[in-house]
Image: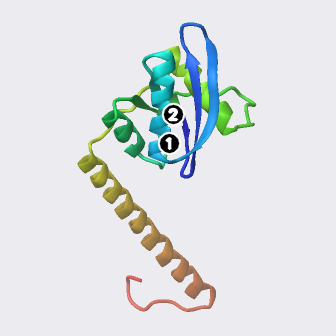
Amino acid sequence: MDVHKRTIALCVYNARTGVILDERGLPHDLPKITKYLWKVQDRHGQVRSCYEASSCGFGLQRALQARGISCEVIAPSSIPRRPGERVKTDRRDAKKLATLYAAGLLTIVCIPDEEQEAIRSLLRCRGDLAETITRTKQQILAFLQARGLQCPGKTN
């Protein structure tokens, strides 16, 4: 699966035969995704799914696991990229993920529980805010310096 905020591109790949059984795009709507994956599971047997770790988080993985569908999150750094491979589409990415996942060539990310994820998110937000404060102070000082103004004393 190639997961985005509004859409998900799916590629159903048969690892035994090496044949792509279906490719389609769906809205990022959990009931529709689950219904589709259950249909695939009814037709073709056990389904294993994966998607690339992104800003979408681990919510989809947790929801699919809770509904009995195997889902893993893949480290983006483990996906091989050819030099010169610049054209990227959701369908191509989903197809590439499916084939590499079936071959066992991808690294699976350890999924944090919801509390750990919340703590990580808070720490990232705090770090971003600290960087913003530093950058804003530097911009103000540069603005004042360009106009010949200086702060009195040793500190700004």
85 vs 16: above or below: below
Q: Amino acid at mark 1?
A: Lys
Residue 130 coordinates in the image, percent (x, y): 39, 67
Quarter of the picture holding the C terminus: bottom left
134 vs 43: above or below: below
User: 35 or 112: which is nearer to us?
Assistant: 35
* Coloration of the structure image: rainbow
Which residue shows up at 56% across the image and 52% down it?
6
Question: In the rendering, which numbered label is found on residue 32?
Answer: 1
Which residue shows up at 26% across the image and 47% down it?
116
Residue 102 coordinates in the image, percent (x, y): 51, 17
150 vs 63: above or below: below
- Please say whether residue 147 is visible from this viewpoint: yes
| Residue under label 2 | 36
Label 1 packing within 10 angstroms: few (<14), some (14-19), many (20+): few
In the image, is 105 to the left or to the right of 87?
A: left
Residue 50 coordinates in the image, percent (x, y): 47, 30
In the image, is 52 to the left or to the right of 82?
A: left
Disc 1 and disc 2 in contact, CB within 8 angstroms: yes
The residues bearing labels 1 and 2 have C-alpha atoms spaced at a distance of 6 Å
Q: Amino acid at mark 2?
A: Tyr
- Please say whether residue 105 is visible from this viewpoint: no
Which residue shows up at 51% across the image and 25% down it?
40
